Image (tube, rainbow, N blue to C red):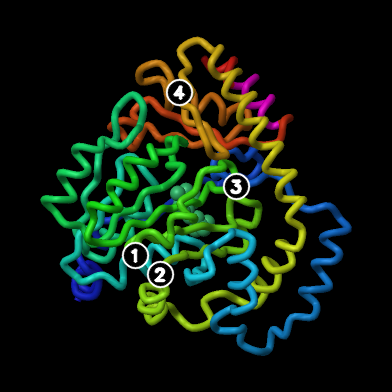
Amino acid sequence: MTEQDLISTVIRPEIRALSAYKVADATGYIKLDAMENPYTWPEEIKAEWLKVIHAAEINRYPDPEAKSLCRILKEYNQIPAESDILLGNGSDEIIQLLLMALPGSATVMAPEPSFVMYKQIAQCLGLNYQGLPLHADTFELDLNLTLATIKSQQPEIIFLAYPNNPTGNLFDSSAIEQIIRQSKGLVIIDEAYAPFTNFSFINQLTNYKNLLVMRTVSKLGLAGLRLGFIAGDSMIINQLNKARLPYNINILTQCSVKFALTHPDMFTEQTEILCSERARMFLQLSTLKDIRPCPSAANFILFRTAKDKATDIFNALKNQGILIKNLSPQKGLLSDCLRVTIGKPEENNAFIKALKNAI
Ligand code: PMP
């Protein structure tokens, strides 16, 4: 049996057809590619944290339901008391868990362009995936098309990132509500970028049984700990919980996130700086020739370059030590698009300077 024969026997065709999710090696670069918070913690907070880690009983399994962490997350995120939450090893794991629970013939919908993992995981699991093209100029939902597609295809699940990645905009909230009302399946509002906007669907959770809101601590500044959660009707959360692996949130993550959230002011301060840097970056990008930034409610800005220039500019930035994300290989609406994460003021200045050289 050849290697190819073995692979064809043991790996499903939909997985063979996929490419693995790749992350660029950022060693030595100013890293503005992955929507991370550039700030770490003051030394005295780190020292307190080490004491917490020191006390963790790593010879024991962690609390399988991470009960105290759930309580703290519910409070920090103002989740209604009636709603339940379920935790994942990053919100990526929750997307996988949601899709694993669907019937094998299910249809998954998400706007295009949006967060790539909705499609990647749906395809990996052999589900039908249906992209909903956004309006070309504004990246807003095409409501008529979306409602018509929901009616004709009856998707079991729709993902709406709010704000959307990679475009940064918040979809019209009344359009989202119409989608929730029209949909007979689940609607997942993915609020990964919640720390950078005041808009949220969390206070709508009790109005709709089919609405779930997903969040992560990654963008807040804890990406390395890998923790996401989904909130919604307890009957649905209970069902999803059956598909969750026991102990999926390790003990170091549980105690570290609990500790981190006892310092809410530190995160507020950091996100406030990033929001004001976002406004400054947007203005600076707007003044550059042939660069058209899109308004953003997240910690990154998508911008269009002159036609077919995105890859050249991306490479020219890399040559100057700045790593951002080149979205132009995704083609379609993103053909001439690059995405920059908001960094520290000095990193943002270095980026703008390098971009001026590049164009
Ligand atoms: N949702 C969106 C919209 C994202 O952009 C990302 C990460 N870039 C995620 C979810 C995944 O986040 P996590 O780190 O919690 O897996």
How packed mark 1 is, by other alpha carbons closer than 10 Å (few <14, some 14-19, many 20 or more), is some
* The label number, if any, that marks residue 312 in the structure image: 4
Give the foreground label among 1 and 3. Answer: 1
| Residue sitting at the far front | 207
| Residue sitting at the far left | 152
Say which of 335 and 267 sits in front: 267
Q: Earlier in the sequence, mark 3 or mark 2?
A: 3
Q: Earlier in the sequence, mark 1 or mark 3?
A: 3
Residue drawn at x 15%, y 44% is: 148
Q: Is mark 1 within 8 Å of ligand 1?
A: no
The answer for how far apart the CA atoms under marks 4 and 2 are is 48 Å
The residue carrying mark 3 is: 195
Please say if 71 is above or below 147: below
The residue carrying mark 2 is: 233
* The label number, if any, that marks residue 209 in the structure image: 1
Q: Amino acid at mark 2?
A: Asp
Which quadrant of the view contains residue 167?
top left
